[in-house]
Amino acid sequence: MDTNHPINFKPVTGTNKSGAIRLQIEAAILDNIFQPGDRLPSERELQEAFKTSRGSVREALGALKQKGLLEARKGARGGYYIREMDINDTIDQLAVMIKHQQMPLAKLLEFQYAMDQAVLAAAVTNGKPADIDQLDAMADELVLLCQARDPDYEQISAIDKNLNLLMVKMTENPFFEWMMRSVQLTFRSYEFVVYQTPSVRTAIAQNWKNVALALRERNFQRATRLYGHWYVLLEQCLCKQFGHKVFEQKTVQPCVSDTQN
């Protein structure tokens, strides 16, 4: 739809005029002056409002489009429209950014462990009995899958993912869920190495059972020790698979199919 909002933008000055334009438009979007689906004023109108060149306006609009706040449409009713924000797009972008930075694996795991500690604390406090029952039932299913002679790794991976997402759901804090999804997209493939090791996967599955019990007892210290044990097993598996230097190097890209037995 067209916007009927008056143009209240202020003229820009200084050397970085496109940046100043971008900040004003972004502030208007975040303050809900412009709603998703609204069309921005035309480039000419924006040029007059900001008292600057068409080039500066276009550069600012292009930056906002790249940021995901605007979308360009063609045709008789073309122009720049406010884009509906999708949290999944943001999660994907964050995961891509983390991968692009090629951080050493030790730094990635250090961050995840710190986040898991916060998730545990909130889950112990806020976890509902029904959610803990569900976690326990999923852990039972994981134990059976991990004990199978020919494990279904795809199903194991799905349950493991859902166990982690259920944990963050119990925190009742959406920020944890957003960050956990980003973490999973970034380096869950490393963590899955533990399930490819026969001598370890049953221990990991049982560890989830024990975590469910610790949550039921509201025992944060025990839950923390169990998570710490999981990270010790993960480090051992990664060192065996890739060598000790893996923690100092840029991230590698393990393939699940390459590590299956």
Image (cartoon, rainbow, N blue to C red):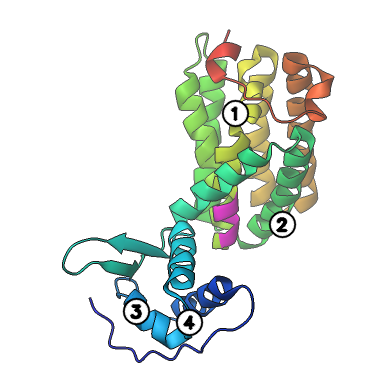
Judged by depth in the image, the label closer to the viewer, 3 or 1, is 3
Residue occupying the point 66% across, 50% down = 215
Amino acid residing under circle 2: Ala
| Quadrant of the drawing holding the C terminus | top right
Q: 27 or 232, which is in the foreground? A: 27
| Quadrant of the drawing holding the N terminus | bottom left
Secondary structure under tag 4 reads loop
Q: Which mark is residue 31?
A: 4
Q: CA distance from mark 1 to mark 4?
A: 39 Å
Q: Which residue is mark 3?
A: 44
Q: 195 or 217, which is in the foreground? A: 195
Is residue 33 visible in this depiction of the protein?
no
Majority secondary structure of magenta residues: helix
For the residues labelled 2 and 1, say whether their Cβ atoms are less than 8 Å apart. no
Q: Which residue is mark 1?
A: 189
Amino acid residing under circle 1: Ser
Q: 144 or 261, which is in the foreground? A: 261
Q: Which residue is mark 2?
A: 121
Q: Residues within 10 Å of mark 1 (few under 14, many from 20)?
A: some
Q: Toward which corner of the image does residue 260 lie, by quadrant?
A: top right
Q: Sequence order check: which comes first, mark 3 or mark 1?
A: 3
Q: CA distance from mark 3 to mark 4?
A: 23 Å
| Membership of 172 in magenta stretch | no
Secondary structure under tag 3 reads helix
Q: Residues within 10 Å of mark 4 (few under 14, many from 20)?
A: few
Amino acid residing under circle 4: Asp
Q: Sequence order check: which comes first, mark 2 or mark 3?
A: 3
Secondary structure under tag 1 reads helix
The magenta span reads: 175-179
